[in-house]
Amino acid sequence: MNTRRPVAASLAVLGYIVMIAPLIFVVITAFTAGSTVRFPPDGFSFRWFEAAVTYEPFMSALLSSLQLAVVASAGSLALGVPVALAIHRGRIPGKGLLEGLFLSPLIVPELVVGLALYQQFMIGLGLNNLTTLVIGHTVLMFPYAVRVTGASLALIDPAVEDAARGLGASPMRTFVTITLPLLRPGIFSAALLSFVTSFNNVPLSLLLQSRDFRTLPVTMLDYVQQNYDPIVASTSVLILVGTVLIAVVAERTVGFAKIFGGINR
Amino acid sequence: MRRRGLLVLLLPGLALLLAGFLVPALIMVLAPPGTTTAEVFSRLVRMLGDPYDLTIIARTVGLGLVVTVTCVVLGFPIAYLLARSQSRWAGVLLAVAIFPLLLSNVVRTFGWLVVLGSEGAIGQTLVALGIVDEAPQLLYTPLAIVLGLVQLFLPLAVVSCYSALAQVDANLDEAARGLGAGRARTFWTIVVPLSWPGVVVAATLVFAGSVTAYTTPYLLGGSRQRMLSTQLFQYSSSTIDWAAASATAVIMTVLVFGVAALSTVMGRRSRTS
């Protein structure tokens, strides 16, 4: 602890306790041998981890969440990276407005977007919930694709691209051999942010759930409301471990702070 | 780039944004299923005069403000100490602070059920120490919601403050102190004003997040401590009152846009002064 700044140091310690302590209690509870979420836990066992990985509703929801997150991230990148290219490389009027438009899904409350899609797509047009979820999540991930890849595009010197074109490369070839490789860290950051955000999403997915296709966070939320046993704690620990692995990969490849700096600015 | 090339790049994304977001959001306000624009607006006006609805709005805004102030008060020192530290542990501590942003809100909020529940850590500790006979009711209180939301948004406050503080030259602190300013005076006259835009961004993100969050008020506030988000879900999933749902959505959206506009003004003022 920094003893020269006692006030700042105490506040910082308090902040870390609020952020981390509840997670430590989840981990402790997950290893209980008892049948309730109680503190202190009754003994030590792995029984709730076994219960978690064999509990069909959670596992099929996990699969659904993973599929949705992959499709939505890929979709938002496929449509969003070209938009970032047009904004940063093309001469178009109203660039700021256009970028603002693609960031707007970050500002409008997600629950409101969910309600709008539920009313117009599922009730109005009769689309199934999977289609609606894919559309909603893809739109919601646009800000990451447009902003994060845009920020890394802004760092690439256009002269390099001009040089390639001057040497006779077609625009397509220039993009594939010059721009894309330089853009890779930005695209990786955007993909990671979208994947994690889509996977964890509750408000947008909440009204769009159906019996056939439900995401993991929404399923867990419903479960906690009806039962209160340690299976949610052990499932949480499994998600925690997966998230730590993602964080380590992110740190090794692009750098953690950099990824989160991208969307904030 | 030629015009046609630009259109090919822009149009698919723009089409999905319009069809999958902007148009549905507009229709939701202007013509929800089975009702009319007039109905939504008359419902909106009625809500703003109804004591029950006003309690929910006041609770949402009030808790949002408490969470915002708490996150800045706890997040700024974390960011400040990390940005000024030469220790190699600073990087690890920064990662620990940012990491929860990757973690599901359901997992983070579930932790508070384990801590605050009647069989949970705090209640049982108080009973074991003989301070109380029976575990106090900590869940489904405003305090529970505030704790849950602070845990959720503190990392966001740390990141925003950190990126602002990292740009403030540490030599300026040294210079002020060299000229005879004390530690506190240096902090308030040099560090805070120069990192103010980051604080404004942090406060905006935290407030907007708090007044629209669903998972935390649902799990920690339940039906006893309704917020706008849980109320909106109630209207659209159990009572199926589209006019009320749309009116609530309008209030939430106006709140968020209002604070975003306010922060733009505050950010601009800090740049010109």
Image: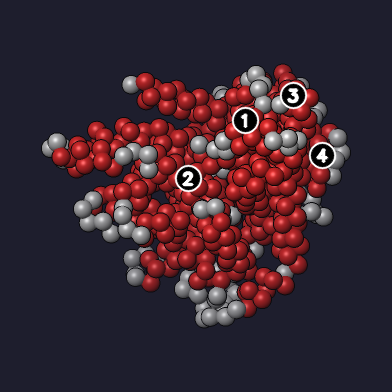
N-terminal of the pair, mark 1 or mark 4, is 1
Give the foreground label among 2 and 3.
3
User: Is residue B131 rendered to the left or right of residue B104?
Assistant: left
Q: Tell me which residue sits at (52%, 69%) in the image.
A: A27
Q: Tell me which residue sits at (48%, 52%) in the image.
A: B98
Residue B71 in view of the camera: no
Tag 1 subunit: A
- In the drawing, what numbered circle is on residue B156? 2
N-terminal of the pair, mark 2 or mark 3, is 3
Tag 3 subunit: B
Between B108 and B141, the residue placed more toward the observer is B108
Disc 2 and disc 1: Cα gap in Å?
Answer: 27 Å
Q: Measuring from the top left, give residue B67's x and y in whole percent.
A: 44, 42
Mark 3 — residue? Answer: B2
Quarter of image, res A134: top right
Q: Residues within 10 Å of mark 2 (few under 14, many from 20)?
A: many
